[in-house]
Amino acid sequence: MANPIQPGADEVFFLDTNIFVYALLASEPLKKQRALQLIEQALASHLGCTSYQVIQEFANVATRKFAQRFNTDQCKQFIAAAMQPMNRVNASPELLNCALNLQQETRYSFYDCLVLAAALQADASVLYSEDLQHNQLIGGTLRIVNPFLMLATEVDAA
């Protein structure tokens, strides 16, 4: 298994909404740093990906829930620069059916299962998210990794 912050050289990885949210939160400096590293790695390697659903979720959070909310132009600029280049999965009947099957198998929420289905459709081997069970294997090929899990330990060791 690759280091959570350094995916394998040819390993496709999927970023969940919380990665993009933490990249902009000054109130969580350690998580912000880790999220920015993942986004930079994703963009530089062209191996990181996300889905249209994640972009929609981010837009909702950025324009409605941030302490300093993004205006429309700021949101569009961030999406165009950091998210749209990684968008590999759009809505489809196949995605919906896969998500429904995953919901029955995993008991995760439907929207979490849409993220899982998108990661599987993108052929990702890792899904970076703090919202799902760390190290769980989905569909025999997709491992969930919480990239923020070791932050407290890393700070204590430094």
Image (cartoon, rainbow, N blue to C red):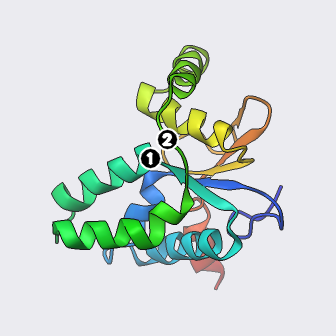
What residue is rendered at 52% in x and 39% in y?
A: 115
- Check disc 1 and give the amino acid type: Tyr
Residue 113 visible here: yes
Mark 1: few/some/many CA within 10 Å (<14, 14-19, 20+): some
Left or right: 88 as drawn, with respect to 47: left
Left or right: 82 as drawn, with respect to 149: left
Q: Locate residue 86: give its quadrant.
A: bottom right
Residue contact at pointers 2 and 1, CB within 8 angstroms: yes
Q: Position of residue 111 (x, y in %)?
A: 42, 32
Q: What is the distance, in whole Å, between disc 2 and disc 1 at their CAs? A: 5 Å
In this view, the residue in front, 1 or 114, is 114
What residue is rendered at 50% in x and 23% in y?
A: 96
What residue is rendered at 53% in x and 24% in y?
A: 99
| Residue that label 1 marks | 52
Q: Position of residue 58 (x, y in %)?
A: 34, 55
Task: Name above or below for residue 110 compared with residue 5.
Answer: above
| Residue that label 2 marks | 90
Identity of the residue furthest to the bottom in this view: 158
- Check disc 2 and give the amino acid type: Asn
Q: Position of residue 24 (x, y in %)?
A: 35, 73
Indicate which disc residue 28 carries: none
Task: Name above or below for residue 95 compared with residue 31.
Answer: above
Which quadrant, please, contains the N terminus?
bottom right
